[in-house]
Amino acid sequence: MMTSRAEYRLLLRQDNADLRLTEKGYKVGLISEERFNKFKQKKEEIAKEINRLKETIIKPTEKVNNFLVNHGTTKIETGTKLSELIKRTELTYKDLEEIDEERNKNLSKDVIKEVEIQLKYEGYIKMQESQVAKFKKLEQKELKEDIDYQKISGLSLEARQKLDKYKPSSVGQASRISGVSPADISVLLIYLEQERRK
């Protein structure tokens, strides 16, 4: 599947494939001990650097503010974490080397790239992770095969037709049917809650 067609493309990026899959590959015997140890080291370096950037506070000195203005971004008036500066579109991890005195200069390009991506897109990644958790809950809400969708008031005509045709086994499946809108899913959830209370 192409990444652009993936439902959660921010989580299923090609640059983080090793972080998502190496451990699983190792458990089933596809990854050597040596490669797995390298992977663990990379993962540790990423976590350590992200943590350092989130804890390192840059003071609003003249040098810092001149640097920020020269890079086309606004000055800071109070101490600001390096992780917050990286989130600015005008700045990169490499740019910040000038004001980041405690930087580990031995980090690999792969580690640097992953650190930058995780920090720049942190808000979006968290949002997508909460969507995944929400959809997992929907997968657990079962739909009986004998539900008469025609009798559920509030469902759009198209949703009734599609739900009758495909007979999804869960609300999660129903939500992936073309023509079933988020409003229809809300109606289904209300219907299930009413049935549960009967």
Image: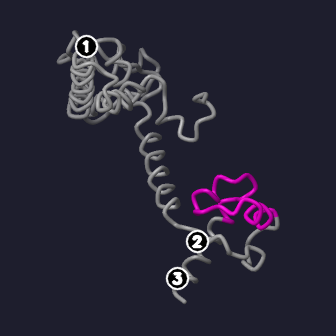
In the image, is 100 to the left or to the right of 75?
left
Bin the neighbour count of mark 2 within 10 Å (Cα to Cα): few under 14, some 14-19, many 20 and up. Answer: some
Q: Which mark is residue 196?
A: 3
The residue singled out by tag 2 in the image is 189
The amino acid sitting under disc 2 is: Leu
Q: Position of residue 83 (x, y in %)?
A: 31, 31
Determine the secondary structure under disc 3.
helix
Residue at 23% x, 32% y: name it.
51
The amino acid sitting under disc 3 is: Arg
Q: Position of residue 131 (x, y in %)?
A: 49, 51
Q: Is residue 169 one of those drawn in magenta?
A: yes
Q: Which residues are magenta?
A: 158-184
**Of residues 68 and 43, which is closer to you in this image?**
43
Residue at 65% x, 70% y: name it.
145
Q: CA distance from mark 1 to mark 2?
A: 49 Å
Furthest-bottom residue in view?
A: 198
Q: CA distance from mark 3 to mark 1?
A: 55 Å
Q: CA distance from mark 3 to mark 2?
A: 10 Å
The residue singled out by tag 1 in the image is 107
Disc nearer the start of the sequence (1/2): 1
Majority secondary structure of the magenta segment? helix
Q: Is residue 101 one of those drawn in magenta?
A: no
